[in-house]
């Protein structure tokens, strides 16, 4: 029999639990999740003996994304009590953890980090349910015009549905298969919100592909089998395939890094080394996910019940799965020093972006640096006065440092060795005016 109780006191690894007809201490491993006032489940095992058991389940898979080697698997709370491995055998809705697949397709089709999406009321007719489907944001409000980056970093449902509606859904599904999804995906609007049940293994394969510069290496458990005579009777040869262009993949990874820096996964900043990822939460808080990676390892965590049931109030992926993911990644990187950041392709570069105009920022207009494929960065749109020191090759300097200005230099403008600065004044009519300053 299993009873629900309440933790009233904690002494080391002993937890005092209040039950309807009993009150006493139970031994259990130390856990940050167990606090005073936390409801827990107690199992009666005979006599006056009870044991503390988690009624909720979870799963974790970690992959070396460069090879496909599965480095860790946790299929559930206790394999002695249940042989059911939730990493391979269970399929649950991934929620927003599915969104990066859709955003990857958008980037493939010319969208950039500053492409505008509409986050406003939208509805679609659902022929199966014979009713309108109206997507909603977790925050319970709309944000109007938002950048593609903002929509994914802050996991806006409505803007994501708007984006999916603008894309070729068949191409999105095809990309999902190429990234590692094996489950058949229906062509429905709610797909972008992770409404189709997938295994943690599938989600791990997708995120491992993102972590490996767009190259999918199929995860595997067995590396080699050697018989008693020392003969190799089986050896796994990893299958790797480039399924997403490196430059497009790098831009997506930069956005997923933003999830950690400023979005739904910001609790993971405590790790202190480069990471990227995405939270996932399903309707009515029945599933919590976090899928993410460092430059060295990819890990996915799922938390929930074996049946569809609400985990708890506001039990998002950030609150349920992310703390477990953080603990695991901290241990996995414990002996690593000077962890390098994700490498970016040569045809990409970081540009400062004005978060109000979604255009290139300048010294007068502060902005966050975001990654773009060179040639797709936004135009300059910030008025003010800008002073540059003049190098020997003035035209080359302009080309390399302020290409968005598209300035036409007046042929009568003469520069000489005494001219040390040039002030560029941009007036209200977007006219560029030069003012040369000499040594004095």
Image (cartoon, rainbow, N blue to C red):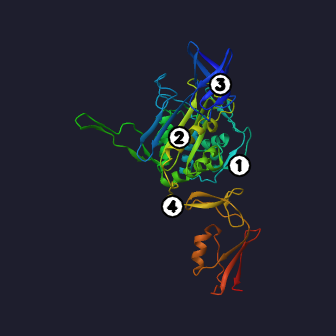
Q: Nearer the viewer, residue 63 or 323?
A: 323
Q: Residue at x 47, y 42 (%)?
A: 179
Q: Secondary structure at mark 3?
A: strand
Task: Name the quarter where the C terminus is drawn.
Answer: bottom right
**Residue that mark 2 sits on:** 328
Task: Residue under label 3, please give it.
Answer: 16
As helix, strand or loop, the secondary structure at mark 2 comes to helix
Gap in angstroms between the C-alphas marked 2 and 3: 27 Å
In whole angstroms, how far apart are the C-alphas of marks 1 and 3? 51 Å
Q: Are marks 2 and 4 in contact (CB under 8 Å)?
A: no
| First in residue order: circle 4 vs circle 1 | 1
The picture places residue 205, in percent across and down from the top left corner, at 47, 40
Q: Nearer the viewer, mark 1 or mark 3?
A: 3
**Which numbered tag is attached to residue 145?**
1
Sequence-wise, the earlier of marks 2 and 3 is 3
Asked if 4 appears above or below 347 in the picture, the reply is above
User: Contact, CB < 8 Å: mark 4 with mark 1?
Assistant: no
């Amino acid at each position: 029999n299993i009873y629900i109780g309440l933790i009233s006191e904690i002494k080391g690894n002993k937890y005092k639990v209040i039950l309807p007809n009993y009150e006493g201490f139970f031994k259990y491993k130390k856990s940050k999740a167990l606090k005073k006032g936390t409801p827990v489940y107690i199992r009666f095992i005979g006599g006056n003996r009870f044991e503390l058991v988690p009624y909720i389940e979870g799963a974790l898979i970690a992959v070396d994304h460069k090879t496909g080697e599965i480095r860790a698997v946790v299929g559930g709370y206790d394999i002695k009590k249940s042989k059911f491995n939730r990493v391979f055998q269970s399929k649950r809705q991934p929620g927003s953890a599915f969104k990066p697949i859709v955003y990857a397709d958008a980037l493939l089709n010319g969208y950039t980090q500053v492409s505008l999406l509409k986050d406003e009321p939208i509805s679609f007719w659902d022929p199966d349910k014979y009713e309108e489907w109206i997507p909603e944001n977790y925050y319970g409000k709309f944000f109007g015009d938002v950048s593609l980056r903002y929509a994914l970093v802050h996991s806006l449902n409505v803007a994501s549905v708007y984006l999916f509606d603008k894309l070729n859904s068949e191409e999105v599904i095809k990309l999902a298969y190429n990234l590692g999804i094996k489950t058949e995906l229906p062509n429905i609007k709610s797909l972008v919100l992770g409404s189709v049940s997938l295994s943690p293994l599938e989600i791990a394969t997708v995120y491992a592909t993102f972590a490996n510069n767009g190259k999918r290496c199929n995860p595997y458990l067995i590396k080699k089998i050697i018989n008693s005579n020392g003969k190799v009777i089986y050896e796994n040869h990893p299958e790797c395939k480039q399924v997403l262009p490196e430059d497009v993949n790098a831009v997506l990874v930069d956005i997923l890094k933003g999830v950690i820096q400023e979005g739904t996964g910001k609790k993971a900043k405590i790790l202190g080394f480069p990471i990227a990822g995405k939270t996932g939460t399903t309707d009515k808080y029945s599933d919590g996910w976090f899928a993410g990676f460092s430059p060295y390892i990819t890990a996915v965590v799922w938390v929930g019940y074996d049946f569809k049931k609400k985990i708890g109030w506001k039990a998002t992926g950030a609150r349920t799965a992310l703390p477990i993911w953080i603990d695991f990644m901290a241990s996995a990187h414990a002996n690593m020093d000077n962890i390098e950041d994700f490498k970016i392709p040569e045809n990409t570069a970081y540009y400062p972006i004005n978060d109000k105009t979604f255009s290139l920022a300048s010294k007068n207009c502060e902005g966050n640096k975001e990654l773009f494929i060179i040639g797709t960065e936004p135009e300059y749109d910030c008025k003010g006065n800008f002073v540059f020191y003049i190098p020997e090759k003035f035209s080359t300097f302009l080309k390399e440092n302020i290409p968005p200005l598209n300035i036409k230099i007046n042929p009568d403008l003469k520069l000489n060795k005494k001219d040390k600065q040039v002030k560029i004044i941009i007036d209200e009519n977007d006219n560029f005016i030069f003012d040369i300053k000499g040594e004095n």
